[in-house]
Image (tube, rainbow, N blue to C red):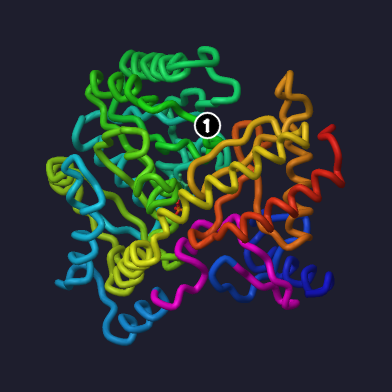
Amino acid sequence: MTGAATTDLMARRARLMGPNVPTFYDAPLHLVRGQGVWVWDANGNRYLDCYNNVPHVGHCHPRVVEAICRQAAMLNTHTRYLHEGILDYIERLTATFEGGLDTAILTCTGSEANDIALRMAEAVTGRRGIIATDHTYHGNTTAVAQLSRTNIPATGDGSHVRHVPAPDSYRPLGGQGGMAHAHAFAASVQAAIDDLNSSGHGFAGAIFCPAFLNEGFPTLEPGWFAPVAEVVRRAGGLMIADEVQPGFGRTGTHFWGHQRIGLHPDIVTMGKPMGNGHPVAGLVTTHDIMTAFRRSFRYFNTFGGNPVSCAAAMAVLEVLQDENLQDNARLVGAHARAGLARLAERHECIGDVRGYGLFFGAEIVTDRATKTPAPNYVLRVANEMRRRGILMNKLGINGNTLKIRPPMPFSVENADQMLATLDGILTDFGPARD
Ligand code: PMP
């Protein structure tokens, strides 16, 4: 695609979609085709996709495409009519959970799922106060946007929301070593609960990604969540695990992020990878919580749980199992992180390498001693990677962490290509001066 064509598309977007609609990269990409871990732009250039978790089992996986087409050709209605599709799917989905998480609602987006989770916490406790981290993103509805301090500015009245400092294992609250970081986090949650109680809102629950992926995927000790879970339970609040990012086997060792860390949530929300790009999301909870919600709110979602979405989502679960993609995430993720650690031996700017399964990256700093973040440098790296045919991006509390989160069929060979390209760029760019 020529520069002129890109400029035309950008101008049309601005005219038809309004200003300020985000794109990735200083040269926005016009993608026209995808297959497995690869995508192609309008000029026929091929890119290795190290970023997209929505095409979870690979772009345009033929089994998912076939399942969608088959069901779309047969019937597509909604949940006011009886259909086996949603029941078969919920049965198979809930079988991946422990702890009585055996009922579900299907939605179209993760935002809707989190919106329902907040209402569930309200229905069960009769209170509204919610705690989230100060560097999270849980979605874009008016209610859910209030959980974000970053990404989307809060709208409406967020006086019932308290933000606690996002965990940062590279610069941990409470100091380095052992569980001090976990106890410091639990103490800030306790302080937020006390504040909600004294403000009159009361405490309904806490919502966290169990791997804090948007926060920059800090390395957390086994048992890290126990102190905060204890604080939340003692105060009578619900623990909501937002699994939109770590779910469906991405962390490699477990199917769900909360299982990896030994957290027992009351509600689990999910989305992004669930339908491999088809808009399906949802939440899973206990029968008692579902009953409290269903008695408080008469919830219906026109598209949520439609037969085509359920067929897509079922195909994703089948492919994950049949192609052993969780194991692949564990093995290839470990290989890639080891490769990044080797790059850190030669490139001073890599301050910390971390992640879980196929969600990993490196924190880029100007100086290891001061751990000074280099967000502009990392942006230049991401843009140069794109120019050299590899898609990745950045995230984290300081915006200086390379974010690598490829489709699950990502191979050792793919990882090696990504590492070699990154090595070349870091060599060409030299030390991070930001
Ligand atoms: N929760 C988390 C952790 C997310 O990262 C996102 C989207 N990036 C959402 C919820 C919202 O999902 P959706 O865009 O499907 O509404």
Pointer 1 local density, CA inside 10 Å: few below 14, some 14–19, many at least 20: many
Q: Is residue 51 magenta?
A: yes
Q: Position of residue 59 (x, y in %)?
A: 52, 69
Where on the picture, by quarter, is residue 243?
top left
User: Which residue position is annotated with label 1?
Assistant: 218
Give the residue type that dot 1 points to. Answer: Pro
Where on the picture, by quarter, is residue 207?
top left
Front-lying residue, 324 or 382 = 324
Image vertical order of residue 80 relative to residue 294, above or below: below
Q: How many marks?
A: 1
Quadrant location, the C terminus: top right
Question: At x 69% / y 72%, what residue is drawn?
Answer: 41
Q: Position of residue 233 (x, y in %)?
A: 24, 23
Mark 1 C-beta closer than 8 Å to ligand 1: no
Secondary structure that dominates the magenta span: loop
Left or right of residue 7: residue 189 = left
Quadrant location, the N terminus: bottom right
Q: The residue tagged with tag 1: helix, strand or loop?
A: loop
Question: At x 39% / y 25%, what residue is drawn?
Answer: 224
Q: What is the span of residues highlighted in magenta in the rendered image?
A: 38-63
Q: Position of residue 274 (x, y in %)?
A: 38, 60
Left or right of residue 402: residue 121 = left
Q: Position of residue 31 (x, y in %)?
A: 65, 71
Q: Residue furthest bottom?
A: 73
Image vertical order of residue 418 relative to residue 82, above or below: above
Front-lying residue, 103 or 406 = 406
Question: At x 40% / y 14%, what residue is drawn?
Answer: 187
Asked if residue 141 can be seen in this view, the reply is no
Question: At x 42% / y 38%, what residue is drawn?
Answer: 209
